[in-house]
Image: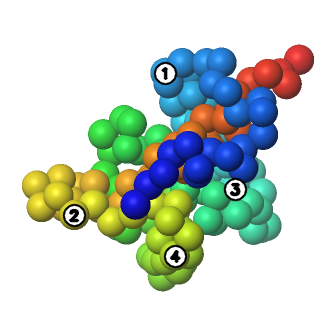
Amino acid sequence: MLNIKKDLEGLPESAKTNHSDLTHLKFAAHIAEQNRLRSRFFNDLTLGDPVWDILLDIYVSEKTDKPTTIDAISNRLETPISLCLRCIDYLLERDAVFVNRNRYMAPQFLYLASEKTKKQVAAWLDNCLASLP
């Protein structure tokens, strides 16, 4: 069971949100797109962390009504399904994401970010935005 107060105890003091959900969404989508573009510029190199890319993709997709199924994530990130499955399993084991049990929504939104994860991503985005020159 989620205990949001306890879950957020480990976040830095700077984790208090200073920006709107829309700002977070736009910035997270920008970062995700730049990660994809970076891979195209350096097509001979493997860059980035697929777990992070998938977590960020789920965060953005959930807020923009894009499917969060393995096939959809794999297609968006141009990542093999097998790698997506391993990364999703890793995130599930750590309660960063969960399987949507709503039979009406699950076919399109199979994986969702936990509340703790959403707060952690928002805190990280706030930190990034605060450190902009």
Between label 4 and label 3, give the one nearer the viewer.
4
N-term mark: 2 or 3: 3
Residue at point 30% right, 39% down?
65
Which quarter of the rendered picture does the C terminus lie within? top right
Residue at point 56% right, 70% down?
94
Camera-side residue: 107 or 48? 107
User: Considering the numbered disc 3 on the image, is that residue within a helix, a strand or a loop?
Assistant: helix
The amino acid at mark 4 is Glu
Q: Is residue 133 above or below residue 30?
A: above
User: Residue 70's spot in the image, x, y percent?
Assistant: 37, 68
State the mark number for residue 22: 1
- Left or right, 45 with respect to 72, comes to right
Q: Which residue is mark 3?
A: 39
Rendering quarter of residue 90: bottom right
The amino acid at mark 2 is Arg
Residue at point 54% right, 18% down?
20
What is the crowding at mark 4: few (fewer than 14 residues within 10 Å), some, or many (at least 20)? Answer: few
Q: Which residue is mark 2?
A: 101
What is the crowding at mark 3: few (fewer than 14 residues within 10 Å), some, or many (at least 20)? Answer: some
Q: Is residue 87 visible?
A: no
